[in-house]
Image (tube, rainbow, N blue to C red):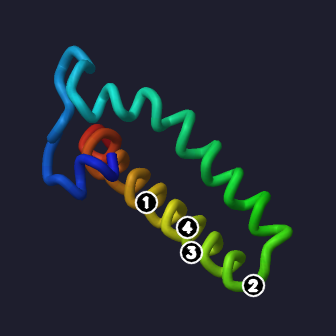
Amino acid sequence: MAWFILNQGPRGNSPRMDGWFDIAWSFGCYLLPLAVAELYFRAERAGPTMQRAVAGVLASGALLSALGVFGAWRMMWGPHL
């Protein structure tokens, strides 16, 4: 839902789930969390600069997740309450 909010609509999505974003996200939903976990584990052994950078990545991910939850509530659940 964060994608819909940031793009103001379903750009790259299609009803049959074969748009360019749909295909990219089918891989990204596995690869992105693995990449972030790898950064986190490497930052444990790295210096404070790397740790701060990874903390920024994690904070950005948390904000995007919060935006997606808000969008889901606003567009999908809220109208039916």
Quarter of the image holding residue 55? bottom right
Q: Nearer the viewer, residue 18 or 48?
A: 48
Image check: 24 left or right of 48? left
Q: Give whichever of discs 1 and 4 has the lower sequence position.
A: 4
Q: Give whichever of discs 3 and 2 has the lower sequence position.
A: 2
Vertical placement of residue 32 versus 66, above or below: above
Q: Which amino acid does the dot numbered 2 rest on?
A: Pro
Q: Cβ–Cβ below 8 Å for labels 3 and 2?
A: no
Q: Give whichever of discs 1 and 3 has the lower sequence position.
A: 3
Q: Which residue is mark 3?
A: 56
Quarter of the image holding residue 43? bottom right
Q: Which residue is farthest bottom?
A: 48
Q: Nearer the viewer, mark 1 or mark 4?
A: 4
Marks 1/4: CA–CA distance: 11 Å
Q: Which residue is mark 1?
A: 64
Marks 4/3: CA–CA distance: 4 Å
Marks 1/3: CA–CA distance: 12 Å
Q: How many residues crowd around disc 3 within 10 Å: few (fewer than 14), some, or many (20 or more)?
A: few
Q: Which residue is mark 2?
A: 48
- The circle on residue 57 is 4
Q: Nearer the viewer, residue 23 or 65?
A: 23
Image check: 17 left or right of 30? left
Marks 2/1: CA–CA distance: 24 Å
| Badge 1 element | helix
Q: Which amino acid does the dot numbered 4 rest on?
A: Val
